[in-house]
Image (cartoon, rainbow, N blue to C red):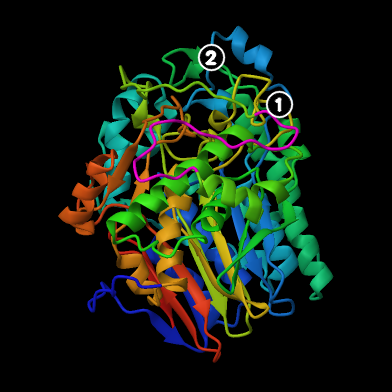
Amino acid sequence: MSFTPPEAFTTRPTLTGTFGMSASTHWLATASAQAVLERGGNAFDAVVAGGFVLHVVEPHLNGPGGDLVGIFATATDPGTPVVLMGQGPAPAAATIAHYRAEGLDLIPGAGGLAAAVPGAVDAWLTLLRDHGTWELGDVLAYAIGYARDGHPLLAQAAGTIARVADLFRTHWPSSASLWMPDDRVPAAGTIVRNPAYAAVLDSLVDAGSGIRGDGEADRAARIDAARREWKTGAVARSAARFLAEPHRHSDGADHAAVIATADFAAFDAGYEAAVTVDVRGHTIAKAGAWTQGPALLQTLRILDGYDEIDPSTERGAHTILEALKLALADRDAYYGDGDLALTELLSADYAAVRRAQIGDEASREWRPGHLSGRAPFRPPLRRTAGEPAAAGVGEPTRGDTCHIDVTDRWGNMIAVTPSGGWLQSSPAIPELGFCVGTRLQMMWLDADSPAALRPGSRPRTTLTPTLVLRDGRAVMALGTPGGDQQEQWQVPVLLRMILGGYSAQQAIDAPSLHTTALVDSFWPRGWTPAGVVVEDRLGDAVIDGLRARGHDVTRAGDWSLGRVSAVGRNRDGLIWAAANPRGMQGYAAGR
Protein backbone atom coordinates (compact mmCIF):
# COMPACT_ATOMS: atom_id res chain seq x y z
CA MET A 1 0.00 0.00 0.00
CA SER A 2 1.57 3.28 -1.11
CA PHE A 3 1.33 6.55 0.81
CA THR A 4 2.47 10.03 -0.07
CA PRO A 5 5.97 10.36 1.44
CA PRO A 6 6.05 12.51 4.58
CA GLU A 7 7.59 15.94 4.52
CA ALA A 8 11.27 15.95 5.42
CA PHE A 9 10.68 18.95 7.68
CA THR A 10 8.72 18.61 10.90
CA THR A 11 7.74 21.43 13.21
CA ARG A 12 9.61 19.73 16.04
CA PRO A 13 11.34 16.37 16.49
CA THR A 14 9.73 13.15 17.57
CA LEU A 15 11.37 12.96 20.99
CA THR A 16 13.07 9.67 21.85
CA GLY A 17 14.67 8.31 25.00
CA THR A 18 14.51 5.59 27.61
CA PHE A 19 13.40 7.37 30.81
CA GLY A 20 9.92 8.88 30.39
CA MET A 21 7.82 11.01 28.06
CA SER A 22 4.95 13.46 28.46
CA ALA A 23 2.89 15.31 25.87
CA SER A 24 -0.12 17.58 26.22
CA THR A 25 -1.99 20.55 24.83
CA HIS A 26 -0.21 23.00 27.19
CA TRP A 27 3.48 23.27 27.93
CA LEU A 28 2.94 23.83 31.65
CA ALA A 29 1.00 20.58 32.01
CA THR A 30 3.66 18.72 30.04
CA ALA A 31 6.44 20.23 32.15
CA SER A 32 4.62 19.42 35.38
CA ALA A 33 4.05 15.81 34.36
CA GLN A 34 7.66 15.43 33.32
CA ALA A 35 8.82 16.95 36.60
CA VAL A 36 6.94 14.21 38.45
CA LEU A 37 8.68 11.56 36.36
CA GLU A 38 12.04 13.16 37.09
CA ARG A 39 11.33 12.97 40.82
CA GLY A 40 10.59 9.25 40.69
CA GLY A 41 6.85 9.25 40.13
CA ASN A 42 5.28 6.89 37.63
CA ALA A 43 3.13 7.72 34.61
CA PHE A 44 -0.05 7.81 36.70
CA ASP A 45 1.36 10.23 39.27
CA ALA A 46 2.57 12.37 36.39
CA VAL A 47 -0.65 12.40 34.37
CA VAL A 48 -2.72 13.34 37.42
CA ALA A 49 -0.38 16.22 38.24
CA GLY A 50 -0.55 17.42 34.64
CA GLY A 51 -4.31 16.94 34.54
CA PHE A 52 -4.93 19.22 37.50
CA VAL A 53 -2.60 21.80 35.95
CA LEU A 54 -4.76 21.72 32.81
CA HIS A 55 -7.74 22.74 34.96
CA VAL A 56 -5.86 25.89 35.87
CA VAL A 57 -4.01 26.88 32.69
CA GLU A 58 -6.63 25.89 30.07
CA PRO A 59 -9.82 27.03 31.84
CA HIS A 60 -11.57 27.68 28.52
CA LEU A 61 -11.00 24.05 27.53
CA ASN A 62 -11.64 22.11 30.74
CA GLY A 63 -12.22 22.53 34.43
CA PRO A 64 -12.80 20.70 37.72
CA GLY A 65 -16.54 20.86 37.10
CA GLY A 66 -16.11 18.85 33.91
CA ASP A 67 -15.37 15.27 32.92
CA LEU A 68 -12.76 13.02 31.36
CA VAL A 69 -12.15 9.74 29.58
CA GLY A 70 -8.81 7.95 29.86
CA ILE A 71 -7.31 4.73 28.56
CA PHE A 72 -4.17 3.03 29.83
CA ALA A 73 -2.12 -0.11 30.26
CA THR A 74 0.09 -0.88 33.24
CA ALA A 75 3.63 -2.21 33.31
CA THR A 76 2.41 -5.31 35.12
CA ASP A 77 -0.30 -6.02 32.53
CA PRO A 78 0.83 -4.26 29.34
CA GLY A 79 -1.51 -6.18 27.06
CA THR A 80 -4.76 -5.22 28.77
CA PRO A 81 -6.21 -1.81 27.86
CA VAL A 82 -8.31 -0.27 30.65
CA VAL A 83 -10.73 2.66 30.37
CA LEU A 84 -10.73 5.33 33.08
CA MET A 85 -14.38 6.41 33.34
CA GLY A 86 -14.75 10.01 34.52
CA GLN A 87 -18.08 10.87 32.92
CA GLY A 88 -20.72 11.83 35.47
CA PRO A 89 -24.39 11.03 34.79
CA ALA A 90 -27.50 13.14 34.59
CA PRO A 91 -28.75 14.30 38.02
CA ALA A 92 -31.65 12.50 39.65
CA ALA A 93 -34.05 15.36 38.85
CA ALA A 94 -32.98 15.69 35.20
CA THR A 95 -36.04 14.29 33.48
CA ILE A 96 -37.38 14.92 30.00
CA ALA A 97 -40.65 16.07 31.54
CA HIS A 98 -38.91 18.75 33.60
CA TYR A 99 -36.96 20.15 30.65
CA ARG A 100 -40.04 20.14 28.44
CA ALA A 101 -41.90 22.00 31.17
CA GLU A 102 -39.14 24.61 30.99
CA GLY A 103 -40.13 25.20 27.35
CA LEU A 104 -37.11 23.40 25.88
CA ASP A 105 -36.87 21.09 22.90
CA LEU A 106 -33.09 20.79 23.24
CA ILE A 107 -30.94 20.78 26.36
CA PRO A 108 -29.13 24.15 26.42
CA GLY A 109 -25.47 24.44 25.55
CA ALA A 110 -24.69 26.79 28.43
CA GLY A 111 -26.09 27.12 31.93
CA GLY A 112 -26.45 24.88 34.96
CA LEU A 113 -29.47 23.04 33.60
CA ALA A 114 -27.07 21.30 31.19
CA ALA A 115 -24.78 20.08 33.99
CA ALA A 116 -23.98 16.41 34.38
CA VAL A 117 -22.46 15.39 37.70
CA PRO A 118 -18.80 16.54 37.58
CA GLY A 119 -16.62 13.47 37.04
CA ALA A 120 -13.08 14.65 36.34
CA VAL A 121 -11.78 15.23 39.87
CA ASP A 122 -13.05 11.92 41.24
CA ALA A 123 -11.56 10.11 38.24
CA TRP A 124 -8.14 11.72 38.69
CA LEU A 125 -8.16 10.87 42.41
CA THR A 126 -9.30 7.30 41.77
CA LEU A 127 -6.50 6.77 39.26
CA LEU A 128 -3.93 8.19 41.67
CA ARG A 129 -5.17 5.98 44.51
CA ASP A 130 -5.13 2.76 42.51
CA HIS A 131 -2.14 3.15 40.20
CA GLY A 132 -0.06 6.05 41.45
CA THR A 133 2.60 6.10 44.16
CA TRP A 134 2.66 9.73 45.35
CA GLU A 135 0.82 11.51 48.10
CA LEU A 136 -2.02 13.74 46.96
CA GLY A 137 -0.43 16.91 48.31
CA ASP A 138 2.71 16.35 46.25
CA VAL A 139 0.70 15.69 43.08
CA LEU A 140 -1.53 18.75 43.54
CA ALA A 141 1.31 21.11 44.43
CA TYR A 142 1.84 22.07 40.78
CA ALA A 143 -1.80 23.07 40.19
CA ILE A 144 -2.06 24.78 43.57
CA GLY A 145 1.02 26.82 42.74
CA TYR A 146 -0.33 28.00 39.39
CA ALA A 147 -3.75 28.77 40.85
CA ARG A 148 -2.42 30.70 43.85
CA ASP A 149 0.71 32.32 42.38
CA GLY A 150 -0.53 32.78 38.83
CA HIS A 151 0.17 31.75 35.27
CA PRO A 152 0.21 33.62 31.93
CA LEU A 153 -3.22 33.69 30.30
CA LEU A 154 -3.34 32.04 26.90
CA ALA A 155 -4.32 34.16 23.92
CA GLN A 156 -7.12 31.70 23.18
CA ALA A 157 -8.43 31.99 26.74
CA ALA A 158 -8.34 35.78 26.53
CA GLY A 159 -10.25 35.57 23.25
CA THR A 160 -12.86 33.31 24.83
CA ILE A 161 -13.39 35.75 27.70
CA ALA A 162 -13.74 38.58 25.20
CA ARG A 163 -16.44 36.69 23.28
CA VAL A 164 -18.54 36.16 26.41
CA ALA A 165 -17.75 39.46 28.13
CA ASP A 166 -21.23 40.88 27.58
CA LEU A 167 -22.82 37.69 28.90
CA PHE A 168 -20.62 37.88 32.01
CA ARG A 169 -21.37 41.55 32.62
CA THR A 170 -25.10 41.30 32.05
CA HIS A 171 -26.06 37.85 33.35
CA TRP A 172 -23.14 36.07 35.04
CA PRO A 173 -21.56 38.63 37.41
CA SER A 174 -19.68 35.96 39.36
CA SER A 175 -17.87 34.99 36.16
CA ALA A 176 -17.13 38.65 35.43
CA SER A 177 -15.59 39.01 38.90
CA LEU A 178 -13.36 35.99 38.38
CA TRP A 179 -12.28 36.47 34.77
CA MET A 180 -12.66 40.23 34.18
CA PRO A 181 -11.13 42.07 37.15
CA ASP A 182 -11.86 45.79 37.05
CA ASP A 183 -14.43 45.01 34.33
CA ARG A 184 -11.70 44.53 31.72
CA VAL A 185 -10.93 41.52 29.57
CA PRO A 186 -7.38 40.49 30.51
CA ALA A 187 -4.84 40.61 27.71
CA ALA A 188 -2.99 37.53 26.55
CA GLY A 189 0.01 36.95 28.79
CA THR A 190 -1.59 38.58 31.82
CA ILE A 191 -0.72 36.74 35.04
CA VAL A 192 -4.03 35.41 36.32
CA ARG A 193 -4.73 33.79 39.68
CA ASN A 194 -7.52 31.70 41.09
CA PRO A 195 -7.12 31.63 44.89
CA ALA A 196 -10.59 30.16 45.39
CA TYR A 197 -9.69 27.05 43.40
CA ALA A 198 -6.33 26.81 45.15
CA ALA A 199 -8.26 26.73 48.44
CA VAL A 200 -10.48 23.93 47.11
CA LEU A 201 -7.42 21.85 46.29
CA ASP A 202 -5.93 22.61 49.70
CA SER A 203 -9.14 21.35 51.29
CA LEU A 204 -8.80 18.04 49.47
CA VAL A 205 -5.30 17.57 50.81
CA ASP A 206 -6.36 18.63 54.30
CA ALA A 207 -9.21 16.11 54.29
CA GLY A 208 -6.75 13.26 54.71
CA SER A 209 -4.31 14.97 57.05
CA GLY A 210 -5.64 13.16 60.13
CA ILE A 211 -4.87 9.73 58.64
CA ARG A 212 -1.38 8.72 59.78
CA GLY A 213 0.93 6.09 58.43
CA ASP A 214 3.36 5.49 55.60
CA GLY A 215 1.81 2.37 54.11
CA GLU A 216 0.05 2.10 50.79
CA ALA A 217 -3.28 1.56 52.54
CA ASP A 218 -2.76 4.79 54.47
CA ARG A 219 -1.97 6.71 51.27
CA ALA A 220 -5.10 5.30 49.65
CA ALA A 221 -7.18 6.22 52.69
CA ARG A 222 -5.98 9.81 52.49
CA ILE A 223 -6.99 9.99 48.84
CA ASP A 224 -10.39 8.49 49.62
CA ALA A 225 -10.84 11.16 52.29
CA ALA A 226 -10.23 13.77 49.59
CA ARG A 227 -12.80 12.08 47.36
CA ARG A 228 -15.38 12.23 50.16
CA GLU A 229 -14.60 15.89 50.76
CA TRP A 230 -15.12 16.64 47.05
CA LYS A 231 -18.44 14.77 46.89
CA THR A 232 -20.01 15.64 50.22
CA GLY A 233 -18.28 18.81 51.41
CA ALA A 234 -18.19 22.47 50.41
CA VAL A 235 -17.86 21.81 46.68
CA ALA A 236 -21.12 19.89 46.38
CA ARG A 237 -23.00 22.18 48.76
CA SER A 238 -21.80 25.42 47.14
CA ALA A 239 -22.44 24.23 43.58
CA ALA A 240 -25.97 22.97 44.30
CA ARG A 241 -26.95 26.08 46.28
CA PHE A 242 -25.55 28.57 43.76
CA LEU A 243 -27.01 26.92 40.66
CA ALA A 244 -30.46 26.60 42.19
CA GLU A 245 -30.89 30.31 41.47
CA PRO A 246 -32.24 30.94 37.93
CA HIS A 247 -29.60 32.24 35.53
CA ARG A 248 -29.21 32.82 31.79
CA HIS A 249 -28.88 29.78 29.52
CA SER A 250 -27.98 29.49 25.84
CA ASP A 251 -31.64 29.46 24.79
CA GLY A 252 -31.86 33.08 25.96
CA ALA A 253 -34.03 32.28 29.01
CA ASP A 254 -33.31 31.95 32.72
CA HIS A 255 -33.55 28.53 34.37
CA ALA A 256 -32.57 26.99 37.69
CA ALA A 257 -30.33 23.94 37.61
CA VAL A 258 -31.50 20.60 38.99
CA ILE A 259 -28.16 19.25 40.25
CA ALA A 260 -28.19 18.53 43.99
CA THR A 261 -25.65 17.64 46.68
CA ALA A 262 -26.90 14.05 46.63
CA ASP A 263 -25.92 13.77 42.95
CA PHE A 264 -22.30 14.54 43.80
CA ALA A 265 -22.28 11.97 46.57
CA ALA A 266 -23.83 9.23 44.42
CA PHE A 267 -21.19 9.27 41.68
CA ASP A 268 -18.04 7.14 41.67
CA ALA A 269 -15.52 7.20 38.87
CA GLY A 270 -14.08 3.84 37.92
CA TYR A 271 -12.74 1.50 35.28
CA GLU A 272 -14.19 -0.40 32.34
CA ALA A 273 -12.92 -2.89 29.81
CA ALA A 274 -11.89 -1.35 26.50
CA VAL A 275 -13.49 -2.13 23.14
CA THR A 276 -10.99 -3.25 20.49
CA VAL A 277 -10.54 -4.13 16.84
CA ASP A 278 -7.51 -5.56 15.07
CA VAL A 279 -6.18 -3.62 12.11
CA ARG A 280 -3.09 -4.61 10.09
CA GLY A 281 -1.29 -6.25 13.01
CA HIS A 282 -2.32 -3.65 15.57
CA THR A 283 -5.07 -3.69 18.19
CA ILE A 284 -6.88 -0.36 18.56
CA ALA A 285 -8.56 0.15 21.95
CA LYS A 286 -11.30 2.64 22.80
CA ALA A 287 -13.98 3.31 25.41
CA GLY A 288 -17.49 1.96 24.82
CA ALA A 289 -20.62 3.36 23.20
CA TRP A 290 -21.21 5.90 25.99
CA THR A 291 -18.43 7.70 24.08
CA GLN A 292 -17.98 8.11 20.34
CA GLY A 293 -14.91 5.85 20.53
CA PRO A 294 -16.37 2.89 18.63
CA ALA A 295 -16.88 5.19 15.61
CA LEU A 296 -13.13 5.24 15.09
CA LEU A 297 -13.07 1.45 15.27
CA GLN A 298 -15.93 1.20 12.78
CA THR A 299 -14.14 3.60 10.42
CA LEU A 300 -10.94 1.59 10.52
CA ARG A 301 -12.90 -1.61 9.92
CA ILE A 302 -14.51 -0.11 6.82
CA LEU A 303 -11.22 1.27 5.53
CA ASP A 304 -9.44 -2.04 6.06
CA GLY A 305 -10.98 -3.27 2.81
CA TYR A 306 -9.30 -0.62 0.63
CA ASP A 307 -5.88 -0.48 -0.98
CA GLU A 308 -5.84 3.31 -1.36
CA ILE A 309 -6.59 5.19 1.84
CA ASP A 310 -3.87 7.80 1.81
CA PRO A 311 -5.41 11.01 3.25
CA SER A 312 -3.15 13.07 0.98
CA THR A 313 -4.76 11.78 -2.23
CA GLU A 314 -8.14 12.64 -3.68
CA ARG A 315 -9.42 9.05 -3.67
CA GLY A 316 -8.02 8.30 -0.23
CA ALA A 317 -9.45 11.48 1.31
CA HIS A 318 -12.85 10.83 -0.30
CA THR A 319 -12.93 7.25 0.97
CA ILE A 320 -11.96 8.27 4.50
CA LEU A 321 -14.61 11.00 4.60
CA GLU A 322 -17.35 8.68 3.37
CA ALA A 323 -16.36 5.97 5.86
CA LEU A 324 -16.43 8.51 8.68
CA LYS A 325 -19.89 9.68 7.64
CA LEU A 326 -21.25 6.14 7.84
CA ALA A 327 -19.65 5.40 11.21
CA LEU A 328 -20.81 8.71 12.69
CA ALA A 329 -24.34 8.12 11.45
CA ASP A 330 -24.28 4.87 13.41
CA ARG A 331 -23.00 6.83 16.39
CA ASP A 332 -25.99 9.15 16.25
CA ALA A 333 -28.45 6.34 15.64
CA TYR A 334 -27.29 3.73 18.15
CA TYR A 335 -24.75 4.97 20.72
CA GLY A 336 -25.65 5.81 24.30
CA ASP A 337 -25.33 4.69 27.89
CA GLY A 338 -27.25 1.48 27.49
CA ASP A 339 -26.99 -2.16 26.50
CA LEU A 340 -25.77 -1.70 22.92
CA ALA A 341 -23.88 -4.81 21.90
CA LEU A 342 -21.02 -3.62 19.73
CA THR A 343 -20.21 -7.05 18.32
CA GLU A 344 -22.32 -6.57 15.21
CA LEU A 345 -21.34 -2.93 14.63
CA LEU A 346 -17.64 -3.83 14.77
CA SER A 347 -17.85 -7.08 12.80
CA ALA A 348 -16.15 -7.69 9.47
CA ASP A 349 -19.51 -8.59 7.89
CA TYR A 350 -21.12 -5.31 8.95
CA ALA A 351 -18.07 -3.37 7.74
CA ALA A 352 -18.38 -5.04 4.34
CA VAL A 353 -22.02 -3.97 4.09
CA ARG A 354 -21.13 -0.40 4.97
CA ARG A 355 -18.14 -0.41 2.63
CA ALA A 356 -20.41 -1.33 -0.26
CA GLN A 357 -22.39 1.87 0.34
CA ILE A 358 -19.40 4.08 -0.50
CA GLY A 359 -19.47 5.29 -4.08
CA ASP A 360 -17.35 7.62 -6.18
CA GLU A 361 -19.50 10.63 -5.29
CA ALA A 362 -20.09 12.28 -1.93
CA SER A 363 -23.28 11.13 -0.26
CA ARG A 364 -25.65 13.89 0.82
CA GLU A 365 -27.75 11.55 2.94
CA TRP A 366 -27.64 10.69 6.62
CA ARG A 367 -27.27 6.90 6.44
CA PRO A 368 -27.24 4.77 9.58
CA GLY A 369 -26.90 1.04 9.09
CA HIS A 370 -29.38 -1.64 10.09
CA LEU A 371 -28.72 -3.83 13.12
CA SER A 372 -30.48 -7.06 14.00
CA GLY A 373 -33.49 -6.39 16.18
CA ARG A 374 -32.86 -2.63 16.49
CA ALA A 375 -34.40 0.31 14.69
CA PRO A 376 -32.08 3.30 14.28
CA PHE A 377 -32.98 6.45 16.15
CA ARG A 378 -33.42 9.29 13.69
CA PRO A 379 -32.54 12.64 15.24
CA PRO A 380 -33.81 15.86 13.68
CA LEU A 381 -31.56 17.00 10.84
CA ARG A 382 -31.25 20.75 11.23
CA ARG A 383 -29.62 22.09 8.09
CA THR A 384 -28.32 25.23 9.80
CA ALA A 385 -26.86 25.37 13.27
CA GLY A 386 -28.16 28.89 13.87
CA GLU A 387 -26.36 32.07 14.78
CA PRO A 388 -25.93 33.71 18.19
CA ALA A 389 -28.58 36.36 18.63
CA ALA A 390 -27.48 37.92 21.89
CA ALA A 391 -25.27 37.44 24.90
CA GLY A 392 -25.89 34.01 26.33
CA VAL A 393 -27.26 32.63 23.07
CA GLY A 394 -25.38 30.41 20.66
CA GLU A 395 -21.82 29.59 19.79
CA PRO A 396 -19.91 32.03 22.03
CA THR A 397 -20.71 29.78 25.00
CA ARG A 398 -19.25 26.68 23.35
CA GLY A 399 -15.93 25.28 24.54
CA ASP A 400 -13.38 22.71 23.52
CA THR A 401 -11.11 20.18 25.17
CA CYS A 402 -7.52 19.36 26.11
CA HIS A 403 -5.42 16.21 26.18
CA ILE A 404 -2.43 14.63 27.95
CA ASP A 405 -0.33 11.47 27.40
CA VAL A 406 2.41 9.99 29.58
CA THR A 407 4.61 6.89 29.46
CA ASP A 408 7.37 5.94 31.87
CA ARG A 409 10.49 3.79 31.99
CA TRP A 410 8.63 0.89 33.61
CA GLY A 411 6.12 0.51 30.77
CA ASN A 412 3.04 2.28 32.13
CA MET A 413 1.23 4.23 29.40
CA ILE A 414 -1.86 6.44 29.51
CA ALA A 415 -3.85 8.91 27.41
CA VAL A 416 -6.53 11.13 28.98
CA THR A 417 -8.91 13.62 27.37
CA PRO A 418 -10.37 16.02 29.97
CA SER A 419 -13.04 18.55 29.04
CA GLY A 420 -16.16 20.33 30.21
CA GLY A 421 -16.50 22.91 32.92
CA TRP A 422 -15.22 25.57 30.53
CA LEU A 423 -15.19 29.08 31.97
CA GLN A 424 -18.01 29.87 29.52
CA SER A 425 -20.14 26.84 30.48
CA SER A 426 -22.15 28.31 33.33
CA PRO A 427 -21.76 31.00 35.99
CA ALA A 428 -18.64 30.68 38.12
CA ILE A 429 -19.36 29.53 41.69
CA PRO A 430 -17.70 32.26 43.78
CA GLU A 431 -16.50 30.07 46.67
CA LEU A 432 -15.00 27.51 44.29
CA GLY A 433 -13.40 29.47 41.46
CA PHE A 434 -14.90 27.32 38.73
CA CYS A 435 -18.20 26.41 37.07
CA VAL A 436 -19.96 23.16 36.27
CA GLY A 437 -19.98 21.64 32.80
CA THR A 438 -22.68 21.24 30.17
CA ARG A 439 -22.30 17.65 28.94
CA LEU A 440 -26.04 16.99 29.13
CA GLN A 441 -26.42 18.97 25.89
CA MET A 442 -25.42 15.72 24.14
CA MET A 443 -28.59 14.01 25.35
CA TRP A 444 -31.94 14.17 23.58
CA LEU A 445 -35.32 15.15 24.99
CA ASP A 446 -36.77 12.17 23.13
CA ALA A 447 -37.28 8.92 25.00
CA ASP A 448 -36.76 6.89 21.81
CA SER A 449 -33.10 7.90 21.57
CA PRO A 450 -30.42 5.61 23.00
CA ALA A 451 -28.87 8.87 24.20
CA ALA A 452 -32.08 10.21 25.74
CA LEU A 453 -31.98 12.24 28.93
CA ARG A 454 -32.52 9.84 31.81
CA PRO A 455 -31.63 10.37 35.47
CA GLY A 456 -28.48 8.42 36.26
CA SER A 457 -27.51 7.86 32.60
CA ARG A 458 -24.27 9.16 31.17
CA PRO A 459 -24.40 11.51 28.18
CA ARG A 460 -22.78 10.10 25.06
CA THR A 461 -19.56 12.06 25.30
CA THR A 462 -17.22 13.08 22.47
CA LEU A 463 -14.14 12.48 24.66
CA THR A 464 -12.17 9.65 23.13
CA PRO A 465 -8.47 8.89 23.73
CA THR A 466 -6.89 5.90 21.99
CA LEU A 467 -4.50 3.13 22.98
CA VAL A 468 -2.70 1.03 20.34
CA LEU A 469 -1.27 -2.39 21.13
CA ARG A 470 1.02 -4.70 19.20
CA ASP A 471 2.53 -8.07 20.04
CA GLY A 472 0.63 -8.16 23.30
CA ARG A 473 1.65 -4.80 24.75
CA ALA A 474 0.70 -1.13 24.53
CA VAL A 475 2.81 0.73 21.97
CA MET A 476 1.05 4.10 21.59
CA ALA A 477 -1.33 6.40 23.47
CA LEU A 478 -2.84 9.40 21.73
CA GLY A 479 -5.77 11.77 21.53
CA THR A 480 -6.91 15.26 20.62
CA PRO A 481 -9.40 17.97 21.53
CA GLY A 482 -12.04 18.72 18.94
CA GLY A 483 -15.55 17.58 19.89
CA ASP A 484 -17.05 15.69 16.95
CA GLN A 485 -13.69 15.91 15.19
CA GLN A 486 -11.72 13.96 17.78
CA GLU A 487 -12.05 10.59 16.03
CA GLN A 488 -11.79 12.22 12.63
CA TRP A 489 -8.42 13.86 13.34
CA GLN A 490 -7.01 10.69 14.87
CA VAL A 491 -7.87 8.52 11.86
CA PRO A 492 -5.36 10.15 9.44
CA VAL A 493 -2.65 10.07 12.11
CA LEU A 494 -3.19 6.36 12.73
CA LEU A 495 -3.34 5.52 9.02
CA ARG A 496 -0.17 7.43 8.26
CA MET A 497 1.71 5.80 11.13
CA ILE A 498 0.41 2.23 10.89
CA LEU A 499 0.21 1.94 7.10
CA GLY A 500 2.29 4.80 5.74
CA GLY A 501 5.39 4.43 7.88
CA TYR A 502 5.27 8.00 9.17
CA SER A 503 6.86 8.92 12.48
CA ALA A 504 4.49 10.32 15.10
CA GLN A 505 5.55 13.92 14.49
CA GLN A 506 5.35 13.53 10.71
CA ALA A 507 1.81 12.14 11.04
CA ILE A 508 0.70 14.86 13.47
CA ASP A 509 2.14 17.62 11.27
CA ALA A 510 0.61 16.27 8.05
CA PRO A 511 -2.49 18.07 6.72
CA SER A 512 -5.82 16.97 8.17
CA LEU A 513 -9.50 17.08 7.26
CA HIS A 514 -12.91 16.18 8.65
CA THR A 515 -16.57 15.96 7.71
CA THR A 516 -19.39 18.05 9.14
CA ALA A 517 -22.03 15.73 7.66
CA LEU A 518 -23.00 14.51 11.11
CA VAL A 519 -25.45 15.46 13.82
CA ASP A 520 -23.50 17.94 15.92
CA SER A 521 -23.11 16.73 19.49
CA PHE A 522 -23.31 20.31 20.77
CA TRP A 523 -26.24 22.69 21.03
CA PRO A 524 -27.98 23.65 18.73
CA ARG A 525 -27.13 20.33 17.04
CA GLY A 526 -26.87 21.21 13.37
CA TRP A 527 -26.10 19.01 10.36
CA THR A 528 -24.33 19.94 7.12
CA PRO A 529 -24.92 17.45 4.27
CA ALA A 530 -21.67 16.69 2.41
CA GLY A 531 -19.78 19.28 4.45
CA VAL A 532 -15.99 18.89 4.56
CA VAL A 533 -13.32 21.03 6.20
CA VAL A 534 -9.72 20.72 5.01
CA GLU A 535 -6.36 22.28 5.68
CA ASP A 536 -5.12 24.17 2.63
CA ARG A 537 -1.86 22.18 2.70
CA LEU A 538 -3.82 19.20 1.40
CA GLY A 539 -3.29 20.88 -1.97
CA ASP A 540 -5.41 22.33 -4.74
CA ALA A 541 -5.53 19.11 -6.75
CA VAL A 542 -6.96 17.08 -3.86
CA ILE A 543 -9.34 19.85 -2.76
CA ASP A 544 -10.61 20.45 -6.29
CA GLY A 545 -11.03 16.70 -6.74
CA LEU A 546 -13.13 16.46 -3.59
CA ARG A 547 -15.33 19.29 -4.83
CA ALA A 548 -15.73 17.52 -8.17
CA ARG A 549 -16.97 14.47 -6.27
CA GLY A 550 -19.71 16.56 -4.66
CA HIS A 551 -18.15 17.46 -1.30
CA ASP A 552 -18.93 20.95 0.00
CA VAL A 553 -15.38 21.88 0.94
CA THR A 554 -14.36 24.66 3.32
CA ARG A 555 -10.70 25.66 3.44
CA ALA A 556 -9.56 26.21 7.03
CA GLY A 557 -6.03 27.54 6.51
CA ASP A 558 -2.72 25.74 6.59
CA TRP A 559 -2.48 24.84 10.30
CA SER A 560 -5.89 24.67 11.93
CA LEU A 561 -7.29 21.12 12.20
CA GLY A 562 -6.37 18.79 15.02
CA ARG A 563 -4.32 19.02 18.20
CA VAL A 564 -3.19 15.40 18.43
CA SER A 565 -0.44 14.49 20.88
CA ALA A 566 0.99 11.02 21.46
CA VAL A 567 3.52 8.93 23.36
CA GLY A 568 4.71 5.43 22.59
CA ARG A 569 7.19 2.63 22.91
CA ASN A 570 9.06 0.87 20.10
CA ARG A 571 9.85 -2.84 20.00
CA ASP A 572 13.44 -2.14 21.07
CA GLY A 573 12.24 -0.41 24.24
CA LEU A 574 12.88 3.12 23.01
CA ILE A 575 10.12 5.48 24.10
CA TRP A 576 8.96 8.54 22.19
CA ALA A 577 6.61 11.53 22.27
CA ALA A 578 5.18 14.02 19.80
CA ALA A 579 2.95 17.08 20.14
CA ASN A 580 0.92 19.36 17.94
CA PRO A 581 2.13 22.74 16.66
CA ARG A 582 -1.40 23.96 15.88
CA GLY A 583 -2.53 26.55 18.38
CA MET A 584 1.08 27.15 19.44
CA GLN A 585 0.74 25.74 22.95
CA GLY A 586 1.06 21.94 22.83
CA TYR A 587 4.40 20.44 23.77
CA ALA A 588 6.13 17.13 24.40
CA ALA A 589 9.01 16.60 26.81
CA GLY A 590 11.09 13.64 27.85
CA ARG A 591 14.42 11.91 27.83
Could you tell me which secondary element the residue under label 2 belongs to?
Answer: loop
Q: Main secondary structure of the magenta part?
A: loop
Choose top left, top right, bottom left or bottom right for residue 331.
top right
Residue numbers of the magenta segment: 357-375
Instruction: Name the spot of residue 148 as percent of width and height, x first.
Output: 45, 55
- Side (left or right) of 496 relative to 85: left
Mark number, residue 454: 1
> What residue do we see at 71% from left, 21% from top?
93
Q: Is residue 401 visible?
A: no
> Does the stretch in magenta take in 267?
no
Could you tell me which secondary element the residue under label 1 belongs to?
Answer: loop
**Amino acid of disc 2:** Asp
> Which of 383/230 is in front?
383
How packed is label 2: few (under 14 Cα within 10 Å), some, or many (20 or more)? Answer: few
> Which of 347/166 is in front?
347
Instruction: Name the spot of residue 22 as percent of width and height, x first.
Output: 48, 73
Vertical placement of 207 versus 460: above or below?
Answer: below
> What residue do we see at 64% from left, 66% from top?
72
Vertical placement of 232 versus 528: above or below?
Answer: below
**Amino acid of disc 1:** Arg
Quadrant including the C terminus: bottom left
**CB contact under 8 Å: marks 1 and 2:** no
- Side (left or right) of 189 relative to 425: left
Distance between the alpha carbons at the discs numbered 1 and 2: 15 Å
Residue position marked by numbered label 2 in the rendering: 105
